[in-house]
């Protein structure tokens, strides 16, 4: 079994510097005669060390309900994090990845807006016909076709509500996965 090379302090600094320039993990592992896992570990350790050495001078406070606090504590507990401060700090550090615009959501909402505009136009046309009939003093023509049109619109509105709910749930799940990953990284780095 070949012996593995132990990295010196200068090696570790060079790995961090070279990785920042875009050198791949594999190339670094080959160059320094270590495994890629060692390169990942070296980079993560450096990141944690820099984070620990940075001086924290700003304080953030937030007011939440009892239910919100219980839910936050439950998420932290699932990740093995006992400190709310560590959990909040990690979420703040990961906020750039969590609070990004969702282009898929934006596109779907644009499509929903166009669909709602069409429904609004149909409802306006129905109301216009009913109003014209009333002004002329005649009973509005409300036959089978009109009833089918109104049922179709009602069905569309209900289906639309389900689609919006599904979209919101997918977005919530995606954010939850990102937050869980951020908290998991904190828990892994604390060991």
Image (tube, helix red, strand yellow):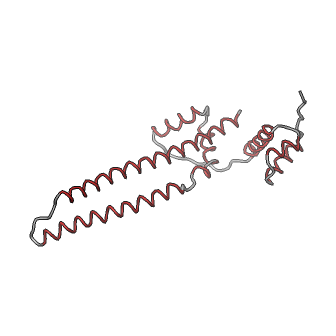
- Quadrant where the N terminus is found in the figure: top right
At 88% from the left and 32% from the top, the residue drawn is 4
Could you tell me residue 145's position as x and y percent?
A: 21, 59
- Looking at the image, the residue that sits furthest to the left is 137
Q: Is residue 73 left or right of residue 122?
A: right
Write down the quadrant of residue 39 in the picture: top right
Q: Which one is nearer the viewer's eye here, 110 or 94?
A: 110
* Number of numbered discs on residues: 0
Q: Is residue 19 above or below residue 2?
A: below
x, y (%) of residue 18?
83, 51
Q: Residue at left 41%, top 48%?
A: 165
Q: Position of residue 155 (x, y in %)?
A: 30, 51
For the C terminus, the quadrant is top right
Looking at the picture, does residue 13 appear above or below residue 139? Answer: above
User: Residue at horizontal 63%, vertical 40%?
Assistant: 86
Query: On the picture, is 106 further left or further right than 12?
Result: left
Q: Is residue 191 left or right of residue 114?
A: right
* Farthest top residue in view: 1
Name the residue furthest front: 145
Query: 136 and 15: which one is in front?
Result: 136
- Residue 6 figure quarter: top right
């Amino acid at each position: 079994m070949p012996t593995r090379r132990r990295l010196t302090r200068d090696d570790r600094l060079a790995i961090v510097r070279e990785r920042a320039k875009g050198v791949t993990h594999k190339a670094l592992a080959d160059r320094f005669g270590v495994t890629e896992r060692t390169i990942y570990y070296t980079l993560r350790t450096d990141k944690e060390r820099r984070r620990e050495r940075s001086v924290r001078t700003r304080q953030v406070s937030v007011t939440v309900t009892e239910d919100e606090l219980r839910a936050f504590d439950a998420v932290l507990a699932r990740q093995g994090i006992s400190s709310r401060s560590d959990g909040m700090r990690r979420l703040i550090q990961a906020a750039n990845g969590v609070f990004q615009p969702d282009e898929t959501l934006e596109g779907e909402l644009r499509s929903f807006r166009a669909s709602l505009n069409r429904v609004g136009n149909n409802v306006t046309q129905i109301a216009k016909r009913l109003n014209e009939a009333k002004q002329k003093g005649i009973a509005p023509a409300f036959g089978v076709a009109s009833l089918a049109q109104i049922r179709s619109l009602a069905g569309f509105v209900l289906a639309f509500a389900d689609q919006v709910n599904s979209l919101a749930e997918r977005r919530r799940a995606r954010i939850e996965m990102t937050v869980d990953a951020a908290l998991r990284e904190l828990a892994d780095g604390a060991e």
